[in-house]
Image (cartoon, helix red, strand yellow):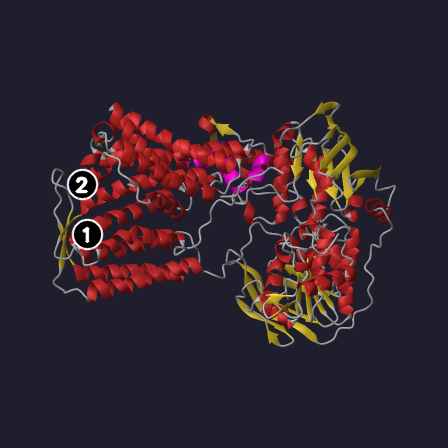
Amino acid sequence: MRLELRGVTKRYGSLVANDHVDLTVEPGEIHCLLGENGAGKSTLMNVLFGMVRSDEGEIRIDGEPVRFADPGEAVAHGIGMVHQHFMLVPVFTVAENVVLGFEPTRPLGFLDRRRARADIRRLSEQFGLAVEPDAVVEDLPVGVQQRVEILKALQRDARLLILDEPTAVLTPQESEALFAIVRSLAAAGRSVLFITHKLKEVLSVADRITVMRLGRVVGTTTAAESGESELATMMVGREVELVVHKGPAHPGAAVLEISGLTVADERGLVAVDGVDLTVRAGEILAVAGVQGNGQTELAEAITGLRAVVSGSIRLDGQELAGRSPDVAIAAGVANVPEDRQVDGLVLAMTVEDNLVLDIFDRAPFARHGARDLAAVRANAEARLVDFDIRAPSPVVSVGSLSGGNQQKVVVARELSRPVKLLVASQPTRGLDVGSIEYVHRRIVEERDRGVAVLIISSELDEVLALGDRVAVMYRGRITGVVDPGAGRDRIGLMMAGVDATDGDRPGPEAPGPPAVAGDGGAP
Amino acid sequence: MSVSALDVPTGLPGAPDRRLVTLGRVRGMGAFLVVLAILTVLAFGVATPGSAHATFTLSAPPAVSVAPLEMSVRTVAVVCAILTAGLGALLVSRRGARGSYLIFGLGVMSFLWAFLTWAARGNDLNFEQMLAATLISTTPLVYGSLSGIMCERSGVINIAIEGQFLAGAFLGAMIGSVSGDLWLGVLAGAAAGAAFGWLLAFLALRYGADQIIVGVVIVAFCTGLTNFLTEQVLTPYQTTLNSPQTFSPIAVPLVDKIPIVGPVLFDQNVFVYLAAVLVVSVNVALFRTRWGLRVRSVGEHPHAAETVGIHVMSVRYRNVVLGGLIAGIGGASFTIGSVGEFSSEMTAGLGYVALAAMIFGRWRPFGALGAALLFGFSVSLQSFLAVLNVGIPSPFLAMAPYVITIAVVSGLVGRVRPPAADGTPYHRE
């Protein structure tokens, strides 16, 4: 299918999310749409998929102008979408999810499950997407769930497949497998629109690349014509440093000692399974792993937000396991939570109040049970300068700030009291490049000041850039602690549960570089 | 694992085998049974004289006669206690959760048997009449919980079942009385329930109002309106407006001759049969048809349903109106199904009990039927115990169904998992 977007414009109030966007995807082409968070990629996709109506512009499919009122119409025109947050019903089976909305039936509307299974098996074999039709989706690893999403689009005979940030939840090896699937789809004549903010994968998978910034198309190029730094410059609009500057760590005494820690998730299932970890003063320990392998629960247990089943968490010898968040705060734990909008900030409250959420009831911000608002204001004004928070005033609601500035508010609050341990989960998720640089620099500064830092991130690039040591988590266990120089492939295998000590076992027929077998960790 | 090379690098097996650390639910049920067993021995065994006997009459006069059953209270207490404790121990020692509800149910039944024997000591208890009374109190609960299932499976909480009951009972009685045609009464009851279902859908879906609040308001409105109309309209014209006939029982040939269960199950009025048909058909429709798959997807993940072209709002509208309709029929069963006249607030909170039955039954028609039977039994138990004069004040006995309801919804039998989007308004982006 040949898809053309001409002059597509979408405004939300005064914000122009898409400003006269032109884009052409040729049949059988893998077209990457590259841009930072907030560049307008998602809005464009929602317009294309009928979730949102554009204000101006037109969409043409094979030369014919089309207009979609809802996703059903987009699907009918051969557009399939794999959303970043999978659109799968967790309690349904694979087969039920794939046929939903497009069900084969017998008389009286009864589902024809046999035909559904047969359809899935046929598509699985045709495109090499191995999946069991009767498995319940919530029991499947995310990589397999993504295949179900792709199958869903193929079952509806999609001729253009949109993949929205598809590698966000995958290990490097799973990503390679996905790229192979994408290439085979393109070889079969289907067009693929691949949306991402990761430069490396753009260069490895794209036939052509379109870069967006602030709602506009900055340019279209190919992987052959441009390298990582050119793309980064186009994406951000200025020269960017792709590395984090940090000197060698000077680790001191152990600050955080975790031993035999077991934590349960909401359903009572083991989420953290007998974890032992040590973080020393003046070092950054980065925990890598695909999202959902217990990292969230680990961070919550350390910061007192989640009950502990067994094991101990000691901070300078003081037991924190099973204590409340205020004990952790008093002991010197700073917490930059995974989801700043839910756990980090009260969005409806002002910037100045959010900056003292943890200590609003103590001197100098309160006396005799009454708040000292002048002190709160003075504190906010100082922090806005120190942490380069771009807010029109300290009394605007924090929800009105951009993601980067919101995150700076969280960081500013957490680092404004004496800190021994900094726990930061996904510290740069959803931020623009400028804010990412700033947050990274700040974290390194804390380390150099002698703070023990625990970073939890599912972005492997971030883990490798920041960590002095890297611990890999898989299914609630630490598969190993390695030097960041151990290599992406070896860490990638550990993220999939392969033990570090046998990381030199060759991945049979694994696509991608055979570096795994070469310099993997010999025991 | 051999379809292609592509599934190799994930290194991830099919399903995670994460074990349960907090086995709270199953163990809690087991511990509860063990406590019940100890209570059984102490209260019904030790504290009862060894000579005490209870007699269960097993057939009502016109039916095929079955000899009455006479049992020693102490023996029954000990046997039942051993059985209950054994089932409790089985639950505590289990690793999985599969079948736990069945074991728990058996344990509770064993306890109830001991309790009944004790309550009937030195007396006669007509077992068959008791079962029949259970079925009568169960019927409206089945309609109510099916109504709840219809709504909540599509993601809308229908807390207004009580109000739809009242509306259905009122209009069913009035139309049945005026027209003299009971089927018109059923239709009128269904229409009244559907109308309030539509009102809930309209306010909750069109305007995104809080579903719980809208539901409570509808109940308050229906209560006030039917009270007012009863006083002002029904009472002055009692003979024309509030004296409908009731449906007479229809015996199913042959099977109604089966001892004990025959007359109880197969000599009932049309409401009971319709309830049975509805349980089966709602179950089949929800889990075997395209319609059901779509309804459940809307209740679990409306956004996903929307992306495959399902119209979330129309599915919800339809289901909430249908749910109201079912509750309306259930309401009519109060008047033209059994009592034969409408009286103020005659549903006595059973709409909420039906909601609890739905939760207890885990949003499944057959589960809800089982729960409704348990609640229905406790309702009928209360009236029988009052007659037997067991020494427990009758207001306490009258609380029994509600105590069980509180125990169920507060998680005594474990946290249950509602449809994921239940009660959440849906907005397109």
Q: Can residue B178 be seen by looking at this rendering?
A: yes
Report the chain holding disc 1. Answer: B
Foreground label between 2 and 1: 1
**What is the x, y in percent for residue A514?**
77, 53
Residue B386 image label: 1
Asked whether the beta carbons under mark 2 and mark 1 sit within 8 Å of each other, the answer is no
Q: Residue at x 29, y 53 (%)?
A: B399
Q: Is residue B239 above or below residue A166?
A: above
Residue A354 percent coordinates (x, y): 66, 59
Query: Chain letter of disc 2?
Result: B
Q: Nearer the viewer, residue A255 or B16?
A: A255
- Kind of residue sitting beneath label 2: Pro
Label 2 and label 1 in one chain: yes
> Residue A513 at x, y = what percent?
77, 51
> Hey, what amino acid is under mark 1?
Ala
Which residue was labeled with disc 2? B259
Q: Residue at x 32, y 54 (%)?
A: B403
Viewer can see residue A183: no
Residue B245 percent across, percent down from the top left? 22, 29
Region rendered in magenta: B284-306
User: What secondary structure is found at the residue carrying circle 1?
Assistant: helix
